[in-house]
């Protein structure tokens, strides 16, 4: 048979291996983007007041990338897999924040980021399922 049809991984509805690979790739993309932004902020006249907006954008890009990766490999229910990826992505970040930041508490901003992460994951999942 001709063609380059990608084979999917045979697994149950929640494939931890693909989720893990997607999350790792999402975190790597986020880390690379954070390093680029850090260099730009250090060596240009970009103000530090833009940092919260940039961190949210980078988080969204990492989540969308992770959700696309997972959905392309799982090939069904992209919105569900993407939403799970977004939720796990932000929950890991919140867990790390609780460990490394002394007075960290889950406040209104953290709840906003949870919703934003799930929304970004859902969008990434929908995009990933539709990539041929």
Image (cartoon, rainbow, N blue to C red):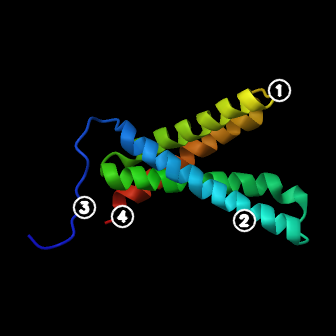
Mark sitting earlier along the chain (4/1): 1
Is 73 placed left or right of 59 in the picture? left
Residue with the mark numbered 3: 6
Residue 59, compared with residue 113, is above or below; it is below
Q: Quadrant of residue 94?
A: top right
Q: Circle 4: is it few (<14), some (14-19), or many (20+) Cα within 10 Å?
A: few
Asked which secondary structure carries label 2, the reply is helix
CA gap between label 2 and label 4 equals 28 Å
Q: Is residue 115 left or right of residue 41?
A: left
Q: Which residue occupies the foreground of this view, 103 or 32?
A: 32
Image depth: mark 2 or mark 4 in front? 2
Q: Nearer the viewer, residue 50 or 30?
A: 30
The percent coordinates of residue 99 (x first, y second) are: 72, 27
Choose the circle earlier in sequence order: 3 or 4.
3
The residue that disc 4 covers is: 131
Structural distance between the alpha carbons of marks 1 and 2: 27 Å
Mark toward the start of the polypeptide (3 vs 2)? 3
Earlier in the chain: of badge 2 and badge 4, it is 2
Mark 4–mark 1 distance (CA, rounded to whole Å): 42 Å
Q: Which residue is depicted at the point 82% across and 26% down?
A: 102
Indicate the position of residue 121 as horizontal and vertical percent values.
51, 48
Label number found at residue 102: 1
Crowdedness near tag 2: few (<14), some (14–19) or many (≥20) residues, C-alpha within 10 Å: few
Please give left or right for residue 15 compared with residue 54 in the image: left
Q: Which residue is mark 2?
A: 36
């Amino acid at each position: 048979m001709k063609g380059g049809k990608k084979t999917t991984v045979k697994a149950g509805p929640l494939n931890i291996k693909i989720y893990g690979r997607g999350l790792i790739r999402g975190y790597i993309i986020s880390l690379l983007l954070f390093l680029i932004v850090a260099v730009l902020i250090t060596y240009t006249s970009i103000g530090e007041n833009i940092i919260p907006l940039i961190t949210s954008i980078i988080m969204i890009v990492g989540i969308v990338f992770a959700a696309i990766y997972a959905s392309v490999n799982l090939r069904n229910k992209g919105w569900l897999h993407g939403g799970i990826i977004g939720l796990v992505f932000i929950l890991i970040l919140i867990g790390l924040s609780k460990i490394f930041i002394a007075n960290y508490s889950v406040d209104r901003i953290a709840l906003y980021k949870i919703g934003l992460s799930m929304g970004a994951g859902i969008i990434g999942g929908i995009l990933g399922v539709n990539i041929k």
